[in-house]
Every structure is written in C-alpha cells, then in structure tokens.
Image (cartoon, rainbow, N blue to C red):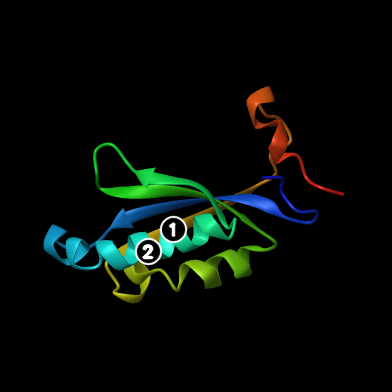
Amino acid sequence: MPIPAGHHLFVIDIRYTAPSEDIESVRAPHMTFIQQCLDDGFILVSGPKVPRDGGLIIAVGESMDAVQARMAQDPFSTAGVVEMTFTEFDPSTRHPALAALAPQA
C-alpha cells in the first residue's frame, strides 16, 4: 500500500503500565481495533515486543495530531493500561521489497 501524498510513517511504541490481568481484560477489543486499522490502511504492521512488555505499531498518517487522536481510541488507551510514544518519520530510504511504500503524488 503506497503512502498517500502528504503523509508520513509513525512508529508507535506501546508500553504496558498496568498489571497483566488488566492488559488481558482489554486485549480482545484492542485486537479488534488493530484489525480495523489494518483493514483501512492506517496500520501497516504491529506486534508485541520481546520481551512482551508492550508492542510496536507502524502507522500511516497525515499529522502527529491525527495519529495520536486515532490511537486515543485504542481500547488499551481508553482503559488507561498503556503509555504510548509517537515518532514521525519520512521513509526516504527503503529496501526494494518496500518500494510500494513510496508516496503517491
């Protein structure tokens, strides 16, 4: 999926801040949210960290504000069981296998 013109990639670093039972109680709704974001192209890739103390997401967005607003809807966020750090970057260099990520004009 190409990155739309005017959009960048965002690394979202998720760190669990609650006991594992609190995390597990909202994991299913979180995964439903992740699937919806994958389906509409907001999320390119996501998964748990190793060791499993959180997760990472690479998302596509027009602005930091838009990405943060979208992630504020994540059940992990609404339940207050995680802390998220956002890093915006412009993928100017990429492996040929990721050529499809070139911005569309």
Residue 44 is left or right of residue 32, and the answer is right
Frontmost residue, 13 versus 25 = 25
- Residue designated by label 2: 32
- Residue designated by label 1: 35
Residue shown at 69%/23% (left/top)?
Answer: 96
Instruction: Determine which quarter of the picture holds residue 2.
Output: top right
Residue 103 is left or right of residue 101, and the answer is right
Q: Spot the residue most to the top.
A: 96
Instruction: Determine which quarter of the picture holds residue 84.
Output: bottom left
Using the image, determine if residue 62 lies above or below residue 58. Answer: below
Residue shown at 64%/26% (left/top)?
Answer: 97
Using the image, determine if residue 4 lies above or below residue 23. Answer: above
Frontmost residue, 76 versus 33 = 33
Using the image, determine if residue 74 lies above or below residue 49. Answer: below
Q: Spot the residue most to the right.
A: 105
Instruction: Determine which quarter of the picture holds residue 7.
Output: bottom right
Helix, strand or loop for disc 1: helix
Frontmost residue, 42 versus 69 = 42
Q: Spot the residue most to the front.
A: 39
Circles 2 and 1, Cβ within 8 Å, touching? The answer is yes
Quarter of the figure that contains the N terminus:
top right
Residue shown at 46%/49% (left/top)?
Answer: 57
Helix, strand or loop for disc 2: helix
Assess disc 1: are there few (<14), some (14-19) or many (≥20) residues with their C-alpha within 10 Å of its C-alpha: some
Q: How many marks?
A: 2
x and y, in percent, of residue 74 in the image: 40, 68
Q: Amino acid at mark 2?
A: Thr
Assess disc 2: are there few (<14), some (14-19) or many (≥20) residues with their C-alpha within 10 Å of its C-alpha: few
x and y, in percent, of residue 77 in the image: 36, 70
Residue shown at 37%/45% (left/top)?
Answer: 47
Residue 74 is left or right of residue 9, and the answer is left
